[in-house]
Image (spheres, grey):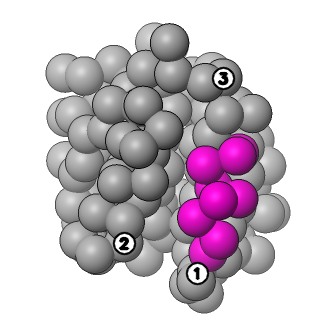
Amino acid sequence: MTILIVDDEYLIADILAFALEDEGYMVVKASNGRKGLDVLERERPQLIITDFMMPVMDGLEFATAVKARPQSAEMPIILMSGAQGSVGRANEHLFNAVFDKPFDIFAVVAKVQELIGPPS
């Protein structure tokens, strides 16, 4: 099972990736929403974790674009945000979960497992 992490903060993306890879998931990363859409086409992940504040295309624009595509309309998306968590919570049709930064990595991994199951 593959998870796409979209975050312009490399340290946060790496921390998430290491934790998820430790659980057995495959992880691909992108540094902004536009690159995330390219990776989405290429890798076909089962779940997306995205930041909100990013250059080029923010998390809200990215999630809207993902949900607009028939092949990814049902894909679960988790939002990670330092300051915009309330925007994510106000858009429940886009985000399956919202975590405020700093986040509890164990809670994030548990939510991933809840949404897509353990890696096979």
- Secondary structure of residue under mark 1: loop
Tag 1: Cα neighbours inside 10 Å, few (<14), some, or many (≥20)? some
Residue position marked by numbered label 3 in the rendering: 117
Tag 2: Cα neighbours inside 10 Å, few (<14), some, or many (≥20)? some
The residue depicted at 42 percent of the width and 31 percent of the height is 24
x, y percent for residue 27? 31, 38
C-alpha separation, residue under disc 2 versus residue under disc 3 = 23 Å
Residue position marked by numbered label 2 in the rendering: 12
x, y percent for residue 72? 49, 21
In this orientation, which residue lies closer to the viewer: 78 or 119?
A: 119
Residue 12 sits above or below residue 96 on the image:
below
Residue position marked by numbered label 1 in the rendering: 101
* Range shown magenta: 103-111
Which label's residue is closer to the chain start, 1 or 3?
Answer: 1
Q: Amino acid at mark 3?
A: Gly
Q: Amino acid at mark 2?
A: Ile
The mark lying in front, picked from 1 and 3, is: 3
The reply to whether the C-beta atoms of the residues labelled 1 and 2 are less than 8 Å apart is: yes
Mark yes or no: residue 65 visible. no
Label number found at residue 32: none
Q: Amino acid at mark 1?
A: Lys
